[in-house]
Amino acid sequence: TENPADTTAENLQARIRANLLMAFSNKYGYLVLGAGNKSELAVGYCTLNGVDMSGGLAVLSDLPKTMVYAVAAEINADREVIPAAIMTKPPSAELRPDQTDEDSLPPYPILDRVLALYLDE
């Protein structure tokens, strides 16, 4: 039987995504942006050499997840740039069926407050 704690296949998916993005970057001269945010990176909810830790610029790495959503809402203030389905869907690494981040982490408002107390105050 499969071990539910075995994340080998999940991590492999994240690494394949990163490799594909880097291949497009090399071929077309694009810059890959790292997808990791401060909340996920601070607690290790990421894959080494995966899409959240790869790229030439990590624009979200100092933003807690709740702030990522606030910035996205501000971007959408005048018109929908980021689809509503993305804004309302529960956060997920999308590495297994029906997975949500809260399967492994506390809700982001709680996690972000704990991290703020620990890291920033």
Image: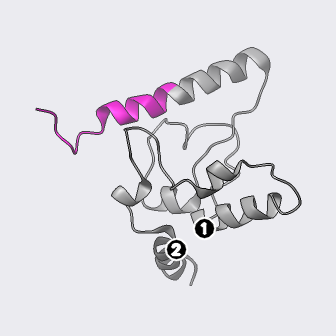
Residue that protrudes farthest toward the left in the picture? 1
**Residue contact between numbered discs 1 and 2, judged by CB atoms under 8 Å:** yes
Q: Residues within 10 Å of mark 1 (few under 14, many from 20)?
A: some
Report the residue at 66% width, 61% height from top. Answer: 68
Marker disc for residue 109? 2
Within the magenta stretch, is there residue 56?
no
Q: Nearer the viewer, residue 95 or 22?
A: 95
Q: Is residue 57 above or below residue 119?
A: above
| Disc 1 residue type (three-letter) | Thr
Q: Could you tell me which quadrant the N terminus lies in?
A: top left
- Which residue is under mark 1? 66
Is disc 2 placed on a helix, strand or loop? helix
> At numbered mark 1, what does the secondary structure look like: helix, strand or loop?
helix
For the C terminus, the quadrant is bottom right
Q: Is residue 44 visible?
A: no
Of the numbered discs 1 and 2, the one sitting upstream in the chain is 1
- Indicate whether 61 appears above or below 16: below
